[in-house]
Image (cartoon, rainbow, N blue to C red):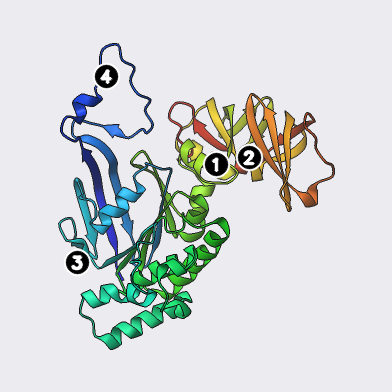
């Protein structure tokens, strides 16, 4: 239905009159603790900076990152609910910076549903079409088609207060899709639901996406939603894009330490280690456990002319194995997770998690037991100590 382009988008929230002076440090007074790392300039607080993204027709893009990273602000700029400070926004190659939200042919689903409590489900879904003076027969057709897709036909005569959270979210989505928008914007739509409902609604959104010829931009702080829903994921931090890629790309080839630690559950294990170059071969050495990297990684490191150096080594818990001659560690906690056991270890001054499939388990582990772990060269990630960037890219 539509392509979306964001070109060098920037959002600055100006200081309220007098706020800059009030926030200046007074003599002898301690500066308040900084809770976010957003850039503060003479103009104000920079919430989004240097945001560049081309979204293809019918693509499902997920913006993901911690609270305060600028993802919802970016979505609201696409919707027209926030003014763009600098840069250009195009929808179907038309500049949208100064176009009113109602004229952008977009629909938005909010975190808090935003339903009219005095209206029935049918009336909530039909409201935007009535404002456009669509014929009654056409309204009825669109509302009932959307209700059928979302399995809420039986609730059309109820009011929102008589519905569960999951049902209300379906109504909010139904109200958006009856408009047949070019772009569907979703701002953390599942965050108010419990875990079971979130899983169910996530599956519903995947099914819905197959039925609608619409471009999706979806905001979440939940990496599971990002990994399961997105064709591509945009990972943000402090107003900047950290990496853009498919779920598999960002999982297998994280661009930096932040992405590596943010994507994946449990989080990646990090160690202080050495990268050793011997001719055209590369090895990582962790406390005497020396492993050669695979040919693909070696080729990229050679291309970047990487030399021997101290590094931060990253290995995912699911890629870490118990071995007979590896890095020595002490068991702190053993968690039975059904199909696997999560071992929380102490090794080299770090907390380490090793996931052991129960089918491979030959013994039980107790607190204080000594074990050894290792990993293969194809799953080792090498990051610069200075910049945190993946040395392969």
The residue at which mark 2 appears reads as 377
State yes or no: discs 1 and 2 in contact (Cβ < 8 Å): yes
Label 2 CA crowd tier, 10 Å (few <14, some 14–19, many 20+): some
In the rendered structure, which disc, 4 or 2, sits on the residue that comes first in sequence?
A: 4
Residue 60 in view (yes/no): yes
Q: Quadrant of the N terminus?
A: bottom left
Q: Residue 19 lies in what quarter of the image?
A: top left
Please state the horizontal and vertical placement of residue 178, each as a whole percent of the image.
33, 75
Whether tag 1 and tag 4 are in contact, CB under 8 A, the answer is: no
Quadrant of the drawing holding the C terminus: top left
Which residue occupies 31% across, 54% down?
75
Question: Judging from the image, what secondary structure is the residue with disc 1 in?
Answer: helix
Question: Looking at the rendered structure, which numbered label has been put on residue 388?
Answer: none
Asked if 204 appears above or below 356 in the picture, the reply is below
Mark 4: secondary structure: loop
In terms of secondary structure, where does tag 3 sit?
helix
Report x, y in % for residue 67: 41, 43
Determine which of the numbered discs, if any, sits on residue 297 in the image: 1
Q: How crowded is mark 4: few (under 14 residues within 10 Å), some or many (20 or more)?
A: few
Q: Mark 3 points at which residue?
A: 103
- Left/right placement of residue 179 relative to residue 250 reads left
Q: Distance between the residues labelled 1 and 2?
A: 9 Å
**Alpha-carbon span between mark 3 and mark 1:** 49 Å
Q: Which of marks 4 and 3 is nearer the N terminus?
A: 4
Residue 390 in view of the camera? no
Q: Earlier in the sequence, mark 3 or mark 1?
A: 3
**Residues at marks 4 and 2 touching, judged by CB atoms closer than 8 Å:** no
Label 2 and label 3: CA atoms lie apart by 53 Å
User: Which image quadrant is residue 362 in?
Assistant: top right
Above or below residue 135? Residue 282 is: above
Of badges 3 and 1, nearer the viewer stands 3
């Amino acid at each position: 239905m539509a392509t979306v382009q964001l070109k060098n988008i920037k959002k600055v929230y100006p200081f309220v009159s007098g706020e800059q002076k009030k926030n200046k440090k007074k003599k002898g007074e301690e500066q308040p603790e900084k809770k976010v790392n957003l850039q503060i300039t003479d103009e104000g607080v920079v919430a989004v900076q240097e945001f560049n993204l081309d979204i293809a027709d019918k693509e499902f893009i997920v913006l993901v990152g911690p609270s305060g990273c600028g993802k919802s602000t970016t979505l609201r700029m696409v919707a027209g609910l926030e003014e763009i400070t600098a840069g250009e926004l195009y929808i179907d190659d038309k500049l949208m910076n100064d176009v009113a939200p109602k004229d952008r042919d977009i629909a938005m689903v909010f975190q808090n549903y935003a339903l009219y409590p005095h209206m029935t489900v049918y009336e909530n879904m039909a409201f935007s079409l009535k404002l456009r003076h669509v014929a009654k027969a056409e309204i009825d057709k669109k509302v009932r088609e959307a209700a059928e897709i979302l399995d809420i036909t039986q609730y059309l005569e109820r009011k929102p207060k008589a519905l569960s959270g999951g049902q209300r979210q379906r109504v909010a989505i139904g109200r958006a899709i009856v408009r047949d928008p070019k772009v569907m914007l979703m701002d953390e739509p599942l965050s108010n639901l419990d875990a079971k409902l979130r899983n169910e609604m996530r599956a519903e959104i995947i099914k819905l996406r197959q039925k609608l010829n619409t471009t999706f931009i979806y905001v979440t702080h939940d990496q599971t939603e990002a990994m399961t829903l997105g064709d591509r994921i945009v990972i943000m931090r402090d107003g900047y894009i950290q990496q853009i890629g498919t779920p598999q790309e960002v999982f297998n080839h994280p661009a930096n330490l932040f992405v590596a630690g943010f994507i994946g559950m449990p989080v990646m294990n990090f160690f202080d280690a050495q990268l050793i170059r011997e001719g055209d071969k590369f090895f990582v050495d962790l406390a005497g456990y020396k492993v050669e990297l695979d040919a693909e990684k070696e080729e990229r490191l050679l291309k970047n002319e990487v030399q021997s150096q101290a590094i931060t080594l990253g290995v995912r818990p699911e890629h870490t194995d118990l071995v007979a001659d590896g890095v020595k560690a002490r068991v702190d906690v053993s968690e039975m997770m059904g199909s696997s056991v999560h071992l929380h270890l102490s090794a080299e001054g770090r907390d380490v998690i090793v996931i052991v499939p129960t089918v491979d388990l030959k013994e039980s582990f107790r607190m204080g037991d000594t074990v050894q772990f290792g990993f293969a060269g194809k799953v080792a990630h090498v990051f610069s100590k200075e910049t945190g960037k993946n040395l392969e890219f």
